C-alpha cells in the first residue's frame, strides 16, 4: 500500500483466512509493519 492510500494509523485489522502459509506469514507482517492488533 502506498503512503497516499493510508488515511491514518492502523489500530486493528480483521482478517478472514484459510490458514495457508502465505496468509499465516502476512499476519505477522501486518503486526510488525503497522504495529496493530490482528483479529482472525
Image: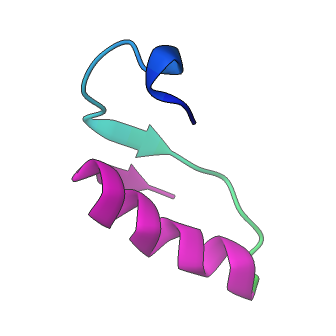
Query: Magenta span has 5?
Result: no
Query: Could you say where residue 23 lies in the image, as x and y percent from the top left?
Result: 67, 71
Along the viewing direction, whichever of 34 and 20 lies nearer the viewer? 34
Identify the residue shown where x is 33% and y is 57%: 33
Identity of the residue drawn at 29% across and 65% down: 32
Q: Residue lying at the far front in this picture: please name it.
A: 3
Instruction: Give coordinates of residue 37: x percent, y percent.
Output: 28, 51
Which image quadrant is residue 28 in? bottom left
Q: Quadrant of residue 9?
A: top left
Q: Is residue 20 left or right of residue 37?
A: right
Residue 39 vertical placement versus 17 (above, below): above
Q: Indicate the position of residue 8 as horizontal and vertical percent values.
A: 29, 17
Judge whether 19 appears above or below 6 on screen: below
Q: Is residue 39 magenta?
A: yes
Q: Residue at x 33, y 39 (%)?
A: 12
> 2 or 21: which is nearer to us?
2
Decide if residue 14 is on the left or right side of residue 24: left
What stretch of residues is rendered in magenta? 21-40
Quick check: 3 above or below 33?
Answer: above
Q: x, y (%) of residue 7?
A: 38, 12
Q: Is residue 8 above or below residue 34?
A: above
Quadrant containing the N terminus in the rendered view: top right
Please tell me whether the stretch drawn in magenta is mainly helix, strand or loop.
helix
Amino acid at each position: 500500500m502506498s503512503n497516499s492510500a493510508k488515511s491514518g494509523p492502523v489500530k486493528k485489522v480483521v482478517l478472514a483466512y484459510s490458514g495457508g502459509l502465505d496468509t499465516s506469514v502476512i499476519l505477522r507482517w501486518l503486526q510488525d509493519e503497522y504495529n496493530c492488533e490482528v483479529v482472525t
